[in-house]
Amino acid sequence: MPEKIYMISCREDLVGLGMGRMRTSVDGLDEVVLSLDWSKVRFVPVIAAEKMNFQIGESKIVTIKPIAVPAYSIVFQSFYGSNGMGDLGCIGCMEMKLYSEDKTANKSMFSSRINASVLPGDLLGQVLIVPGKKL
């Protein structure tokens, strides 16, 4: 019997309930061999879609303009075209999706190095989306 794998959801709405995270058992995260097509990489800006205030060292989940991530694609963070205020940690959505499913990233984790606000239209960073297929 395979070992259980648990997904950790870090949702700000859970904090109000006294929980900072939710731990859920997930099936379908087995190792897979992929073939990546580096000739069709998308270089995509991650753009804030809401205003959010930050304190020094604070990390928050920020709503972003939606980014399509096809099934079996891999997302890499680019260190070119970043935000001088802080760092993009990841992109994703609040619903668990497997690598074998099409996804739309509409949230990102952003950490600020200064006291400032992210505004709608601000560049948070950029990602490379490399299409792939299961072998």
Image (spheres, rainbow, N blue to C red):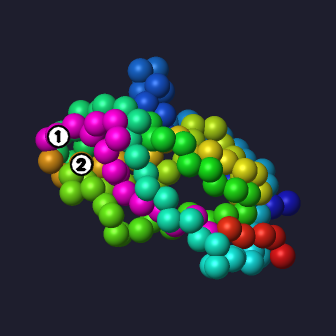
Residue drawn at (62%, 50%), measured in percent from left and top?
Answer: 68
Q: Decide if residue 62 is in sight here.
A: no
Q: Residues within 10 Å of mark 2 (few under 14, many from 20)?
A: many
- Foreground pick, 24 / 38: 38
Q: Is residue 2 visible?
A: yes
Query: Which residue is tagged 2?
Result: 112
**Real-space Cα separation, disc 2 to disc 1, in angstroms:** 8 Å
21 displayed left or right of 115: right
Q: Inspect the image, locate mark 2, and give the three-letter code of the amino acid beneath it.
A: Ser
Magenta residues? 115-130
Which residue is at 66% across, 43% downward?
Answer: 96
Q: Amino acid at mark 1?
A: Ala
Nearer to me, 61 or 118: 118
Q: Is residue 88 above or below residue 32?
A: above
**Are the residues at dot 2 and dot 1 in contact (C-beta closer than 8 Å)?**
yes
Residue 5 image position (x, y, % from top left):
68, 54
Magenta segment: does it hold 15?
no
The quadrant of the picture occupied by the N terminus is bottom right
At a point 73% along the width and 57% down the height, the residue shown is 71
Q: Residue 107, position in %: x, y?
A: 48, 41
